[in-house]
Amino acid sequence: MNELPFWKRKTLNEMNREEWESLCDGCGLCCLNKLEEWDSGDVYFTSVACKLLDGQSCRCSNYEKRRDFVPDCVQLTKAKVQEIAWLPPTCGYRLVNEGRDLYWWHRLVSGDPETVHQAGISARGRTISETEINPDDLEDYIVDWPLTVGDGERAKG
């Protein structure tokens, strides 16, 4: 049977919990500390990762209890996908919400959770843990690569 995959035939609201969770590509970009300018609302990514981010897998090291350790961790919900402007351009949640397809390197397409790293999309090897810096120095770590990682992929698509 040639049935379309769930992310092509369902909206985010129609997905069950397992489908929803599987949209995460494991890039780790959501787990980077961000700075927001109060007056303009502009958001800047840093290369400083949440203390719970596993720098190798780019997954949360304690996902189920993350809010116990990081109370301000943003829990992505179906409603929040539309509200969070800083979701990376390659984010599966953002793509599906915008009616676009997942990239070839997404684990649901490739069948391999390593392709996001092999394609250079993830935070692997690019971050420092927030436990290793002085929080007052966060602005010294501002980077633009989380917003440009998929530029070559968009040009292909």
Image: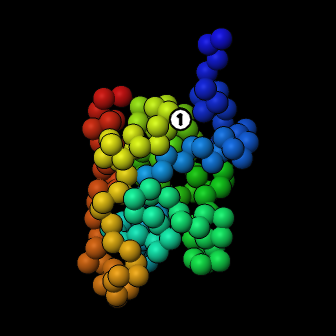
Q: Determine whether 156 is above or below 23 in the image.
A: above
Which quadrant of the figure contains the N terminus?
top right
Seen in the image, is 110 located left or right of residue 118? Answer: right
Residue 41 in view, yes or no: no
Q: Residue at x 34, y 87 (%)?
A: 134
Of residues 22 and 139, the one drawn nearer to the viewer in this rendering: 22
Q: Residue at x 34, y 53 (%)?
A: 147
Seen in the image, is 154 located left or right of residue 32? Answer: left
Q: Residue at x 34, y 35 (%)?
A: 154
Q: Secondary structure at mark 1?
A: helix
Seen in the image, is 64 located left or right of residue 51? Answer: right
Q: Determine whether 102 is above or below 113 in the image.
A: above
Q: Quadrant of residue 151?
A: top left
Residue 8 in view, yes or no: yes
Kindly identify which residue carries mark 1: 108
Which quadrant of the figure contains the C terminus?
top left
- Residue 19 location (% of width, % of height): 66, 40
Of residues 19 and 141, the one drawn nearer to the viewer in this rendering: 19
